[in-house]
Amino acid sequence: MDEQSITVDATRINYVQSGTGPAVVLVHGGGTGSSWQVWKPNIPALSHNHAVFVPDLPGFGGSDPAPVSIASEDDYYRYYPRFIKAFMDAVTPQGAVLVGIANGGGVCLSVAARYQEAVRALVLVDAAVIGRMIETETSQLRCPTLIIWQQDDLLVPPDHARILASRIPGSELRIFPGDEARDEWAGNWPHRLWPVEFDATVLDFLARVAEQQRPAGQGR
């Protein structure tokens, strides 16, 4: 999986692309040192029959800084959803499944709520979703949604996952156990703590979504 670059809204973006098939965009969180490599162990499995795109968000990894000031949570969730939509328009204009972790999950939720026609399905992984988003944007979701959480997430406890599931009609919820013996990935990293199980869960969801969205009369 080779790193590439593309200019999105006058900002040079570093990203990787792997595989062919229906498009999936993976979005990392906002922690120090975050980059596309957060998803590196999962890309081979997810790209087996999907075209997977994984950007470094502006200001992270190998991408240029964001062209606007990101001084608050509101700034973060105002700018990055617009960026992800612009990135999607550039690399997969036909739309994509969005998969986001932590703050990236909140960003993906906003994209799916604001640009419904562009998001075929949504996977939220220990998503940092602030209060106003729960109140307003969950009600605007129209796409199939899978919510994945880790039981020992202390930053965003699993009660938040249950609230999201109750707010998003038809959503699915999967909570993975924690593992104190492997605390390097404890907290909100189920895709690293349980990579095989995580990938299988996401791929099963994507397969069912593809079947549901296949035009009537069109075979496999």
Image (tube, rainbow, N blue to C red):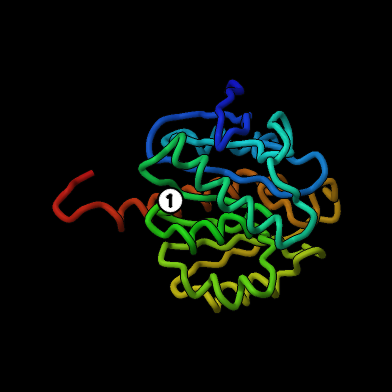
Q: Which residue matches tag 1?
A: 206
Q: Is residue 75 left or right of residue 80?
A: right
Q: Where's residue 139, x and y in %?
A: 49, 75
Which picture quadrant has residue 41? top right
Q: Is residue 91 or residue 158 the one in the foreground?
A: 91
Q: Residue at x 70, y 75 (%)?
A: 159
Q: Residue at x 63, y 60 (%)?
A: 106
The crowding category of the residue bearing disc 1, from other C-alpha atoms within 10 Å (few below 14, some 14 to 19, many at least 20), is: many
Q: Tell me the quadrant of the picture where the C terminus can be found.
A: top left
Q: Where's residue 21, x and y in %?
A: 38, 35
Q: Amino acid at mark 1?
A: Leu
Q: Residue at x 50, y 67 (%)?
A: 172
Q: Is residue 156 or residue 195 the one in the foreground?
A: 156
Would you place residue 178 above or below residue 42 in this image?
Answer: below
Q: Residue at x 57, y 43 (%)?
A: 26
Q: Where's residue 50, x and y in %?
A: 43, 37
Q: How many marks?
A: 1
